[in-house]
Amino acid sequence: MMKFKVSGLVADLMPNIRLIQGSGHFMLNYHADNSGALHTLRLGYCCVTLVFMLLQYGCNFVNLVLERGDVNDLAANTITVLFFTHCITKFVYFAVRSKLFYRTLGIWNQPNSHPLFVESNNRYHALALKKMRRLLYIIIVWTSFSAIAWTSITFVGESVHTTKDPENENLTISEPIPRLLVRAWYPWNAMSGMPHMLTLIFQVYYVFFALAHANLLDSLFCSWLIFACEQLQHLKEIMKPLMELSATLDTYVPKSADLFRAPSATSQDNLIENDYNSKNEDLKGVYSTRQELGGHFRGAALQNFGAGGVGPNGLTKKQELMVRSAIKYWVERHKHVVRLVTAIGDAYGVALLLHMLTSTIMLTLLAYQATKITGVDKYAATVIGYLLFALAQVFHFCIFGNRLIEESSSVMEAAYSCHWYDGSEEAKTFVQIVCQQCQKAMSISGAKFFTISLDLFASVLGAVVTYFMVLVQLK
Amino acid sequence: MVTKTLCLCDIIQTERKLLSFSGFYPRRDNTGIFFYFTRALINTLVTFLQLFSMIGQMVIDRKDLSKLTDTLLYFMTHVTFLVKLINFGYYRRNLLTIEDDLRAGILYSFSKNQLGILISKIDSCNMIAKIFRLSCVLCILFYSFLPLLGEEKGLPLPGWLPYDTDKFYYETVIFQNFSVCVTAFNNSTIDILTWKLITIASGEMEILKVNLRDLVHKDASKTKKIFRSFIERHNALINLVHKIEFVFSKGIFMQFLSSVIIICFTGFQLLVVPMASIQFVFLVMYFFCMMCQVAMYCWYGHEVMTTSDELGKFCYMSNWYDSDINIRKSITIFLEKTKKPVVLTAGKFVTLSLATLTGILRSSYSYFAVLQHLYQQDS
């Protein structure tokens, strides 16, 4: 078991993690006290949640089978079943692949650092944190609002369904059914009284937790992408000072001393001390400042001409080392981001594929249901609600996947727009290889079948609209 | 570093033996060439006879849709097999050059631990091959026993024969079973041979990726030599893939074309045939075999494409920033080459990838929907 020391992504995403644990997902790490009793308790809570979810899902499915006679009921029940299939899939997927999630969460535990770029790093880290929090708030508000809206719409209108009139085969009568959030079959009579109240409460719990399961995992995925994008922004920003720094190796640069001063509000001399460079077991070859420059280091370099320094600017040996290590820092940090994105893709790719599969079928059926809207009533509200929710879920991860693609391909622009022509030969070859690598954008793919981008969302939306138009014409 | 514990040629040993048995694998020497030639001739003759009989049947049945699709199904499979066989026969000399390439030392310059990567890929390919062969065998068994278990004395394969089939019933059954065996045997062996060769290429590329990532750029002259060997290996692998494509590409193209039609018609037959019958089970097995064939081509082609795509990324993951300027220039040129992934195409027309597979399935489904509509109109 892991020692409980929050760092890296786990520390940043602690609210997400706590919410995910609270909703019953099988995330059993990241607790301070992981003794046998508490662990069993938490495991028991997760299993109980799983059992409840599956039971209610089973009841929904049985109801689908029982009501398959009527086409309208069949369509409506299929949509409900598909909707909750997706939520259950996310729940089970996490339980089965939790190792990959832990690995992704642990990837940023020991990032490298460089004294000259600490300020930029911290700034973008804070920016990422702010965005992740904001996303989490939006998701919480959206999920709660959806659950509340679902509950309230249950109490609007009549709670009936149409069946064949037992006396006359050609007519249909409306028969009352229990006033519940989702139509389900129960072995007890849930029409009124205490059973009805209890069933209603159980269904409210079910709907809220099912929505939470799906949305919280998606928000975890998007938070990872936000973090990766902010890291890429950081790398783009330090490209220019990196070039200027490397220029000091072969060309005369006036006031080169300023380049070695780390831009920080509280400029201290001991710039290397930080918590990040502890011993790392997972990532060999990750640059560690302390090993390279050894302990204390004077940030503000002194430009001594004729004091036997290196190169036309008379750099000291330590300064020269600092320049070379800056390039190393950049590349290692970029490689680390690539590793993070690969891990995210491995962890979540299949879940996205399954999501798109269920969403496609569900949206097709919803387009069919939408053609039967006759006016502003409960039916219209539920169909539109389902549609908006499903599309919003797809939009949620598409927009962040798209941002990742844009950010990673813009690194090349940043590399080109920095004054690379002033840099040393070494820096020029560095820019060349970086440009090569960054031409191909980093993207998340749904198990290699499709890429997550706004194109995907546009095609989904386009397909729904097309089906709707065609079906309206056919009526 | 050089390990000769595994010879890459041994991987395709089974397929080589099987195809030599039926007389189609190219031989380096001319011993026993007469019997070899006769075996090939027998196989080809049987196949052509069966083909002509099916064409006859189709001409007779051209008005009735469900009977026509029944014959068309097996006809398409047969035609595909014939095209693949002719293509294989035409290009069989190139297989010997591929074998020679597989024995070249450059493909063996990796350490023992990395051999595990290749072995695991080969093992999974072997397992797929076993499942595929097993389902083919089951299909053949169903072919043979289907008419015997049915009520009327039907023939296993639909076909027009110039004599009265009732008089020579058992002889005809034996002949048709024999032709089915020949088809399935050779067809599956050629497919598995292609898959194994493609797997060897993608396995070697995986090893190259790991080597690139773990390369430590410290000592300039040593790194230069090692990197040079990597580039040579990369070139050898690209050549290998191009040679494989040259030999098998036209056959694969025919396979894709007919797979669309075959999957569509099998699906249609599944609709027509009553569910609780032996024929239904047989059709399901047949459907599985056909799907497996086309899906495996697409899958292994996709593997090579994605593996070669990642070469650049893995080269970037090494500590190239510590390297000499000369090596950096070599790295740059190498990265330029890896930008374009190594793809296998079918007849230079369509690439083997999962995207093609979805395209094939989608076309099959549209044709199936049209057929179903026509059938409902007829009945």
Image: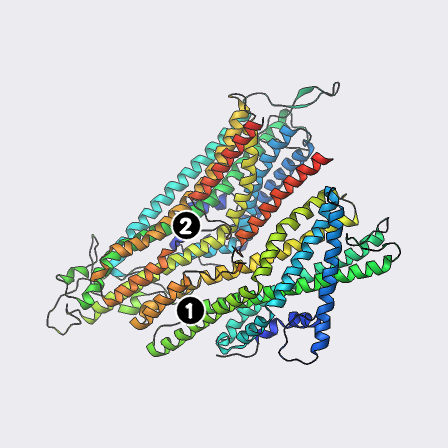
- Asked whether A401 or A432 is in front, the reply is A432
| Subunit ID for the residue under disc 1 | B
Q: Residues within 10 Å of mark 2 (few under 14, many from 20)?
A: many
Q: Residue furthest right?
A: B167
Identify the image quadrant of residue A318: bottom left
* Residue nearest the observer in this picture, A269 or B77: B77
Residue type, label 2: Trp
Give residue B371's quadrant in the image. Answer: top right
| A10 to the left or right of B365 | left
- Whole-percent x and y of residue A251? 17, 66
Coordinates of residue B316 in the picture (x, y in percent): 38, 64
Q: Residue at x 28, y 63 (%)?
A: A327
Nearer to me, A313 or A13 = A313
Q: Position of residue A157 (x, y in %)?
A: 56, 21
- Disc 1: which residue: B212
Kindly identify which residue carries mark 2: A224
Q: Are marks 2 and 1 in contact (CB under 8 Å)?
A: no
